Image: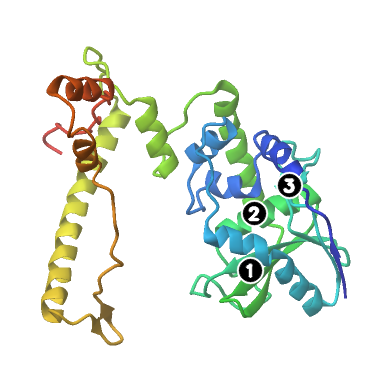
Amino acid sequence: MEFIETERKETDKEAWLEKRKHYVTGTDAGKLIGVSPYGGMFSVWLDKTGRSEALTETPAMKAGKTFESGILKMYAEELDCKLEHVDGYDLKTCEKFPRLGASLDGWNHDLGIPVDAKNIRWKDEKWGDAYTSDFPDYYKAQLQVQMMVTGAKFAHLAVMFSGQDFFVYQMEYDDEMAAKILGASEAFWPYVESDEMPEADGSDGAKNFIKDTFAVGKLDESKEATEEIKETIRQLKNAKAAKAEATGKETELSNRIKAFMGDATVIPGYATWKNDKDSKETDWEAVACEAMEGMNPTQRADIIARNKVTKPGNRTLRITAKGF
């Protein structure tokens, strides 16, 4: 076994992030073909056009980065191979698929394949036996792009579950998924080049972008409904009705359980109903009143007037159509 640790320079990060904007990466591919739980085409468009919100590193992301080297070392030991933990800020590209780019975690020099490392909280039904391709499709999309860019015929996914259960999964080059990724990438990229907004998806990024971009509506402007938007409105109306019914049922069942528990905080093995930690917050209105206590009414009014901020009212979408 030989393990090579390649230096990763934080100074290269900004250049890497900028370069990623010009390619469809493995994480993008999963969103474009509809297998990622982290967004769709709209999310990728926000990212490629520099409109996405700054990404805050979550504890899960930090843990994944921290344990990546250790997971790859365990992989190298299990397969007794020469494994390189590559520079993650090096975006791999190739002439055959010029639209694609991939940042690798590891490279198995003995087999000539990419190795991706994942730190997963627990192994659920989405994960199968070791050395099978029985794992979530959004990870398969990542590996598929890595294989397309590097020319590998298969790839490995090294996974650490619950900090102690180590599994290696294997995926063969998938011609069907490759075709889907290429087709989706070609269909998507004109939106980047034209800076035209694609169809919105259900991601928080799309929600926030639309809210901020169209914060104030023009009262004298209207649009005639297309057949497509009529169908969308019908679906939204049905979805709202289903949500209201589900919410009502959820509230009813929750109330029954709470009434049964009363002052108890635990139904052993089934449920808990505990108070969160107490929180403290500053009553700034009271602070301001106390600070202005010695001022005359004119001085108070002047301070209040100077600190007033006008905020546009929220735009609320209401469905007025009847007969659906």
Which quarter of the picture shows residue 120?
bottom right
Q: Which residue is mark 2?
A: 142
Q: Secondary structure at mark 2?
A: helix
Which sits earlier in the primary sequence, circle 2 or circle 3? 3
202 sits left or right of 17 in the view = left
Identify whether 75 is placed above or below 192. Answer: below
Residues at marks 2 and 3, CA–CA distance in whole angstroms: 23 Å
Q: Earlier in the sequence, mark 2 or mark 1?
A: 1
> Where does residue 270 sit, x and y in percent of width and height?
28, 82
Residue type, mark 1 in image = Ser
Count of residue discs:
3
Q: Earlier in the sequence, mark 3 or mark 1?
A: 3
Residue type at the position of mark 3: Glu
| Furthest residue toward bottom | 268
- At 71% across and 58% down in the image, what residue appears? 173
Please tell me whether residue 76 is drawn above or below residue 171 in the rendered image. Answer: below
Q: Is there any visible trace of residue 200 in the rendered image?
A: no
Report the residue marked by disc 3: 10
Indicate the quadrant containing the N terminus: top left, top right, bottom left or bottom right. bottom right
Which quarter of the rendered picture does the C terminus lie within? Answer: top left
Q: Mark 1, residues whose alpha carbon is within 10 Å: few (<14), some, or many (≥20)?
A: some
| Secondary element at image label 3 | helix
Spot the residue most to the front: 294
Question: Which residue is painted at 51% across and 36% down in the image?
Answer: 52
Left or right, residue 260 beside residue 109: left
> Relative to the observer, which residue lies in front, 57 or 167?
57
